[in-house]
């Protein structure tokens, strides 16, 4: 029997338990919207890599010896069969001009009231030769102090291997950004809020670029716009209206206001992530393209 590795577009919402919320949501959206192609390595693969030590991660984190053993197993050589299955599955996922993006898809993140945004490892522009190490870095980020502290404040314990890993084709965006299907502030309620930067979204995350900010009504009409400079490129009004329409549809699909990450490659709009808006959603961490 093979390892739990699936093409992203084959996932649906029922696959959350093995492949995590981010990947299941994107798989669900891929039947209707453009989502960069990818594969997902299920959380049971990490459990297999950890062996018996993965059954009680909370206890394992409490001693230096156990933490060292966790890292040794995570970064240890993968079973040859697993390595083969990952690269066989990757044949159907062409690398973008900049390679692949490797992102976390934990069973705990991207939930209502608990996004885990920015808590886990992600990597952009990963080559085939660097792919396995990036996957291992993603696994290892489950054991870092930040996500455990975040989880503790929300009354949960990361006491088992819960990290699936999403590997996607990187696209080369003209623009990227975030869209709230229902504004995250009291003033912007009932408005669709879009923020945009030229190129990849990591410029926005790193603070290297101040975004254009748009507020639209539910019909896609721009109510307000402001930007750092009139000389800074921005998406056209038609593209903004199209993003707003997609946001309304995705909100209806999931039944809750959504925090959506998007990118435009020429005229094509890609959805990179969709999760419920949380109180921390205004502090957006974009996946780059992709996160």
Image (cartoon, rainbow, N blue to C red):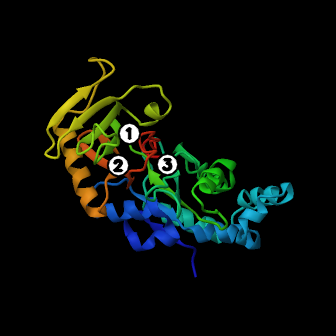
Q: Name the residue carrying label 2.
A: 260
Residue under label 3 = 101
Residue 135 seen in render: no
| Residue with the most extreme front position | 186
Q: Which mark is residue 172?
A: 1
Residue furthest toward the bottom? Answer: 1
Q: How crowded is mark 2: few (under 14 residues within 10 Å), some or many (20 or more)?
A: many
How many residues crowd around disc 1 within 10 Å: few (fewer than 14), some, or many (20 or more)? some
Q: Residue at x 69, y 64 (%)?
A: 78
Secondary structure of residue under mark 1: loop
Lower sequence index among marks 1 and 2: 1
Query: Which mark is first along the chain, 3 or 1?
Result: 3
In 3D space, how far apart are the residues under numbered discs 3 and 2 (Cα atoms)?
18 Å
- Give the image location of residue 130, x and y in percent: 61, 48
- Which residue is at 34% across, 54% downward? 35
Q: How far apart are marks 1 and 3 (CA)?
A: 12 Å
Q: Is residue 223 visible?
A: yes
- Residue 266, percent from left and from top: 26, 38
Left or right for 110, reference 36: right
Q: Select label 1 or label 2 by which is in front.
A: 2
Residue 240 on image: x %, y %:
21, 39
As measured in the structure, the alpha-carbon distance from the residue carrying label 1 to the one carrying label 2 is: 18 Å
Vertical position of residue 283 compared to residue 231: above or below: below
């Amino acid at each position: 029997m093979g390892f739990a590795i699936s093409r992203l577009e084959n996932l649906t919402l029922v696959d959350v338990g093995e492949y995590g919320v981010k990947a299941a949501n994107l798989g669900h959206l891929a039947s209707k919207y453009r989502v960069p192609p990818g594969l997902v390595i299920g959380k049971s693969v990490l459990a297999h890599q950890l062996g018996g030590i993965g059954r009680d991660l909370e206890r394992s984190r409490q001693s230096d010896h156990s933490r060292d053993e966790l890292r040794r197993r995570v970064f240890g050589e993968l079973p040859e069969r697993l390595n083969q299955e990952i690269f066989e599955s990757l044949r159907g996922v062409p690398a973008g001009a900049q390679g692949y993006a490797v992102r976390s898809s934990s069973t705990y993140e991207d939930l209502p009231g608990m996004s885990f945004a920015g808590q886990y490892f992600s990597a952009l522009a990963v080559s085939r030769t660097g792919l396995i190490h990036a996957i291992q870095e993603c696994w290892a980020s489950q054991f870092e102090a930040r996500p455990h502290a975040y989880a503790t404040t929300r009354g949960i314990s990361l006491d088992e291997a819960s990290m699936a890993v999403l590997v996607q084709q990187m696209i080369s965006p003209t623009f990227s950004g975030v869209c709230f299907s229902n504004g995250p502030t009291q003033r912007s309620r009932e408005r669709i809020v879009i923020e945009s930067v030229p190129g990849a979204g990591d410029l926005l995350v790193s603070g290297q670029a101040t975004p254009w900010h748009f507020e639209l009504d539910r019909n896609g009409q721009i109510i307000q716009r402001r930007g750092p400079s009139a000389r800074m490129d921005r998406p056209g009004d038609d593209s903004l209206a199209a993003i707003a329409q997609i946001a309304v549809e995705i909100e209806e699909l999931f039944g809750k206001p959504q925090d959506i990450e998007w990118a435009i490659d020429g005229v094509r709009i890609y959805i990179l992530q969709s999760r419920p808006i949380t109180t921390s959603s205004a502090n957006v961490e974009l996946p780059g393209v992709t996160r």
